[in-house]
Amino acid sequence: MSTVAITATTEATATAPAGGVWPAAQLWGVVLVVPYVLVFVVFVLYPVCYGFWIARRPETYVNLFDDPIFARAIVNTLVFLIVGINLKMVVALFLSNFFVQPRWWIRSLAVLFILPWALPSIPTILSIRFMLNPEWGLVNAVIFRLTGDDGPNWLNDPTLALALAIVTHIWKSLPFWTLILISGRLAISKDLYESAAVDGATAWQTFRYVTWPSMRTLYLTCTILSMIWTLGDFNSVYLLTGGGPADLTHVLATLGIRYLRLDSVDLSMAAIVVALPLVLPLIYFMMKRLSR
Amino acid sequence: MNPRAIATEAKLLLIGIPVFLWTILPVYHMVLFAISPKDSAFAGNLWPDHPTLNNFAVVLQQKHYYLNHFWRQLSNSLVIAVATGAITLFIATCAAFAISRLKVRGGRIVMNLALFTYFIPAAFLAVPMYRTMGLYGLLNSQWALILAMVTLASPYAIWVLKQGSDTLPEELDEAAYVDGASALQLFRLVYLPLMVPSLVAVGTYALLLAWNEYLYAFLLLSKDTEVTLAVALGNFLAADDSPWELLMATGLIYALPPAAIYYTFKRYMVGGLTEGAVKS
């Protein structure tokens, strides 16, 4: 028995020197990896295939493109991604430089600053929604007190409502990206900043020639990852505007639920299939980056 | 202080004060509503004139139509979050150990499938998942939500654990082997103790993900006694004359445990997240 085991071991180490020391390693490996593979097959692979099957008929796509709400949702999603994410990342980059300043009050503020990320989104987004209520919301109460005029009906105007959904999204996820960029910023050698100061560099020059070159790759990765996650951000839109007014603020993430409510699952799946050319390159980019 | 230093401090304050207001305002508004009597909250006051804990008493005693099942829903949230955390931890630890230490054949493919799942926007998978849960006969069972959350949480969990596990030295395995340990003994006695920080990060991540989840929860569960507190909060939106002050009090109770957990494990969370989310 033991001889067999030893031969098997030498063979295993010969073929795979980096691991598999145990004779039974492969067997145990399979046993241990099976639970996840099962979860993947039953709850990812099968649903995805089923989804494609539901969305297989060409008429579905004709109906989908005939629906003005779908076109509007695509535009909204693009605005959300292009304007919202870039705005958020620029602010996060700016704040990452602010939060590394050595001051006691900035350290305390940093602890507080994480709060939007640490709290669940439902109560906080609903709180923002009430703040914006035209009749008794806090925002319009303040506007009335300061100007004596009634404030706008924030969530009843499609453009304003979408803008506010983007603001809500930024409020919620800004801390996370700032934290990531702070860790990137802290990895830059302090000597570089000291020599820049000695050379009399301005704040902009320091950023342009010291901070940015080291942060560029991280910043790009963060932007792409944030775009992928934002495509799945259901809460910021659904809980704030519910897709309204008149279904004009839907994004791809909420559109699926709208079609489900209308009892057209095929449209809901087709909308996702149509979005794949947008999503897959982003996913491919991230996979390349992470599996290096 | 020379004038230049004062100017720098002023500039920092000019950034710090707006950041403070921006961060705190929605949270302050939530607390303000939660501790105000109904008429005062709706008058648009910036400051609680008559702070009261009455709203919390109403919530805790379930004395409102919307809150008939408050305690039940709170415990549903807890059970689902804990189950998701435990099952994710189990599945992900096993898979990461098999891929990283035992170098199981096809491990790279499994890792890539997991990563791919991690990058599918969660809302895109919701409708197909909802339909298949129906086919499996799991709809309206809490298992549907637990399994869905495990599906969403385990890819990232496996990835973080694999990253952590890859940094353990190869010699450990060889030494354990020379000492006559079996693969499972290596797993139990060497691997698990060394991985504790990553395990804490991953378990907390899965737990919070499930506790905070809204979309999947409202799709997969529907009975008032079965839903999580997240869904119950969303149900307040059903009517225009909802008791917002009670909603905010309930929301505060719902928000406190995850915030406390987050701040307690922040060291682990931020480390794991930075490592996991982005590697430049």
Image (cartoon, coloured by chain):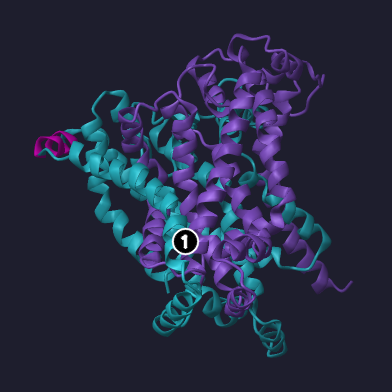
Chain colours: A cyan, B purple
The residue positioned farthest toward the left in the image shown: A58
Vertical position of residue B169 compared to residue A255: above or below: below
Kindly indicate the quadrant of the structure image that contains residue B11: bottom right
| Local SS, label 1 | helix
Question: What stretch of residues is rendered in magenta?
Answer: A58-65
All told, the count of numbered labels is 1
- Please give the residue where the numbered disc 1 appears in the rendered image: A28
> Label 1 is placed on what type of residue?
Trp
Q: Say few, some or many: other residues with alpha carbon within 10 Å of mark 1 (under 14 / 14 to 19 / 20 or more).
A: some
- Using residue B253 as the reference point, say whether residue A12 is left or right of it: left
Q: Main secondary structure of the magenta part?
A: helix
Chain for disc number 1: A
Q: Nearer the viewer, residue B99 or A237?
A: B99
Q: Image point 17% across, 38% down: which residue?
A: A65
Q: Where is residue B95 shown, x and y percent of the image? A: 48, 58
Residue A76, placed above or below residue A101: above
Farthest residue, direction right: B1
The location of residue A148, given as percent across then percent down, is 63, 26
Q: Is residue A117 above or below residue A280?
A: above
Lateral position of residue A288 relative to residue B208, left or right:
left
Which residue occupies 89% across, 71% down?
A: B1
> Is residue A148 in sight in this rendering?
no
